[in-house]
Image: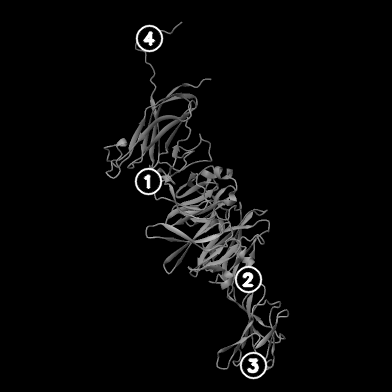
Amino acid sequence: MPKRIVENESIPEVSTRAVTLEKFRGVDLSSSVTNVAATRSPAAPNMMPSADGFPVKRPGWHAVLTLEGEVHGAYTLVKNGTAHRLVHAGTTLYKVTVGEDGAETAAAVYAEMADRESSGVQLNEKLWLLDGKTYLVYDGETVQPASAVATVPKITIAKAPNGKSGATSYLPVNLLTGKRTDSYRGTEETKAETVYYLSFNALTDTAVTAQVLQADGSWAAKAEGTDFTVDRPLGKVTFKTAPGKSPVDGEDNVQITYEVADRADTINKCRFCILYGVSGALDRVFAAGSPDEPNVDYWSEWSDPAYFGDVSYSILGQESSPIMGYSVLADTLVTHKQGEENGRNAFVRKGELDSDGFAVFKITNVIQGDGAVATRSFASLNSEPLFLTARGVYALTPSDVTGERYAQERSWYIGAALTREQALEKACATVWGRFYVLAVNGTLYLLDGAQKSYESKNPYSTYQYESYYWPGIPATCVWVEAGALRFGTAGGEVREFWPGTLAGQYNDGGQPVTAYWCTPLMNLGTWSNVKSVTNVWVVGKPYSRSGGEMYFITNKDYERLGRSYNIDIFDWNDIDFNRFTFNSLDGPVVVPMRKKAKKIQTFQLKVENARPNEPFGLLAIQINFKVGGLVKK
């Protein structure tokens, strides 16, 4: 029987509720779409934070150079206030110059590089490069093997000519060259000796040279064949006239320089390097990455990258776990391994001088944790060394070095995406302003050093960096040039991201950049009831020309278009009569979407801009809705 309606009986009203999204952060690609915080996005390609923290569309890129072969690296030598720029592409090293019109040109300066990634550092106004094939030096004019300018060490002093009394070891052999010098001291007992024994035998065919100290303190040069003969297999020099006793008591009077087979490939085969020295000084080159000695690194002599002593090396861990790269933290050098069996993958060393004044680099700690997976992923953001592991980007902190705990994850919000990427060993990174930029398989992942958040789902890390991602960027290497982010491609192009100060700078090589911001998939406060979204307002960031499309996703519709909109500001320099506006206020623009979504269980909003020449940004989103009856099958 129908229920009788009683006059004046109160009828329950359905009140309108609102969800306001503002103070946006970055993306969260690790949580399920329903568990993402309201201020983050589960999908926001090609977005980045503005200077004041709001999500905006990234600028586009433009090609600045086209070279032959895959781009492997870029380097700058600053000498006498002038920057000399190099780019390694294919097997060629190019010098880049900028014309008066700003156009860049490249000319080959060296054509025998390895066709693979390279590494370089500047020291003593020269650039020192490693590519796994040849250790090179660039002085601003020419590129040549470092062995061509290798320091020739004096390996012995006070040596007796006849070898009957021991010499004093002086300097170590230089791995970069087979040349070395023995220094002899003629005494009353040996003044008649004409045969001088060298410290090494099996000499090469390179001419042996000698000098003899004169009574006036000068050195007289002696020539092979004229003043002496050489027995190369035995390592013996025979003077036609005995050099005699030293004219200065206690001083050496004969120096003989000769050459044996070198061990330059020990350094040539290294693939990456860093500057480090005693007490953290950046005055030595540390090199590693040789496939012949994967767990060994070498360091140069003080302020002399052309001199790698044969005793200046460390064996770190097992051969099965190669050295992957370096971090400098305070005054220590952290050497990262790929993955030791016991998980002790970060060796901490500190440079000191021993009692004889020689540099030693002692291991002070070994830290447990995940190993590094990419040799080019090491970079320092806010003085915090970052590197890539199989589980994401990790950081070293001072407490890690003292052994209190291991490296902390900094990429939790994109960690799930990173773990799904293939071939992580090819990843490369750089620091661009406030961002750590990691290039992996055609996507740039950005960690924002200016935005830190504590994530309860990863309690062992003190904080995470807010994160963003830019798909469709086929970077083989990334670097910063004059403040601008650049990347190289497999096809030989060098591309640079525009600064984003003009509307036309929001295209990728002429094609529009597609960027959008998705809200989390929201239940609007209840799972048990259906809801009806009555209104949506998007607060757009003001630009002279901008706009977008609003889509909503529900359990009934996938990306249903709510509306398109324009939010332009009148500008005499940019008038489009098809989009003419009298608005001249440079302030937030509230855009309504009146299309309703009725009797839904979940709601998600997507705001997109895929238009050419247009920037785009969001300040806030408000969603009004009403709660209905219970969800029924």
Mark 1–mark 3 Cα distance, whole angstroms, equals: 81 Å
Assess disc 4: are there few (<14), some (14-19) or many (≥20) residues with their C-alpha within 10 Å of its C-alpha. few
Residue 504's label in the rendered image is 1
Residue type pointed to by label 4: Val
Query: In the rendered view, would you say 434 is above or below 37?
Result: below
Residue 161 in the image: state x and y as whole percent: 68, 87
Identify the residue position indicated by label 2 in the image: 175
Mark 3 or mark 4, earlier in chain = 4
Identify the residue position indicated by label 4 in the image: 6
Q: Of 402 and 194, which appears nearest the observer? A: 194
Callout in the foreground (1, 3): 1
Residue 160 in the image: state x and y as whole percent: 68, 86
Residue that lies at the very extreme toward the top in this rendered image: 1
Task: Kindly identify the residue that appears in the image at 42 percent across and 37 percent down.
Answer: 608
Residue type pointed to by label 1: Gly
Residue 301 in the image: state x and y as whole percent: 57, 71
Residue type pointed to by label 3: Lys
Callout in the foreground (1, 4): 1
Residue 360 in the image: state x and y as whole percent: 60, 69
Mark 2–mark 4 Cα distance, whole angstroms, equals: 103 Å
Mark 1–mark 2 Cα distance, whole angstroms, equals: 54 Å
Identify the residue position indicated by label 3 in the image: 245
Residue 262 appears anywhere in the view: yes
